Image (spheres, helix red, strand yellow):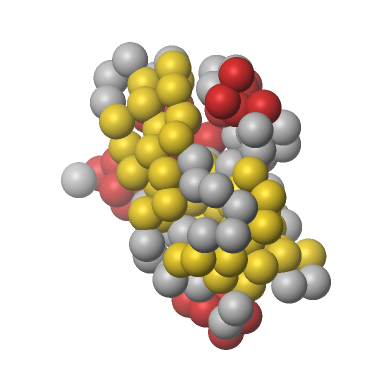
Amino acid sequence: MYPEDCLYTKEHEWIKVKGNIGVIGITDYAQESLGDIVFIDLPEVGEKYDAGDPFGTVESVKAVSDIYTPVTGEVVEVNERLKEGPEKLNEDPYGEAWLIKIKVASPQELDGLLKAEEYAEYIKEEAKK
């Protein structure tokens, strides 16, 4: 259900790391919970964040939600296509609709993130509350 090559946060972001670059997006669960996404605000290349910092917002017909970075690092690329077509987040949250790429400053932070199976279990537990 959730891609095995990604790590997840309890705030419903995912990160896929290749070398020292992490691609970050929101999970399918997050986009589904938000409903139709109509606007996205993303950072500029070069901005630096600590793990857990908000780096942007997603606005849907239901709500505005912050997006948090799972790791400390510097933004090296932003998915500009989402500014013109934020609805892509509803269509392909793990592919074309990635949000930012970040140069990972502290790889050990990845150890604190959830694997796909753990994230799926977390979602099940949250649904019971």
Residue 17 position, x and y percent, is 71, 64
Residue 47 position, x and y percent, is 52, 59
Does the image show residue 61? yes
* Residue ID at (60%, 18%): 85
Of all residues, the one furthest to the right in this rendering is 19
Q: Quadrant of the N terminus?
A: top right
Q: Nearer the viewer, residue 97 or 126?
A: 97
* Residue ID at (32%, 51%): 125
Q: Is residue 119 above or below residue 72?
A: above
Write down the quadrant of residue 51 in the picture: bottom left
* Residue ID at (46%, 66%): 49
Q: Is residue 121 left or right of residue 16?
A: left
Q: Nearer the viewer, residue 37 or 55?
A: 55
> How many dots with numbers?
0
Q: Quadrant of the C terminus?
A: top left
* Residue ID at (68%, 50%): 77
Residue 50 position, x and y percent, is 43, 71
Q: Is residue 7 above or below residue 125?
A: below
Q: Nearer the viewer, residue 75 or 92?
A: 75
Does the image show residue 117? no
Q: Is residue 71 left or right of residue 104?
A: left
Write down the quadrant of residue 76 in the picture: bottom right
Q: Is residue 67 left or right of residue 118?
A: left
Residue 45 position, x and y percent, is 61, 52
Q: Is residue 82 above or below residue 101?
A: above
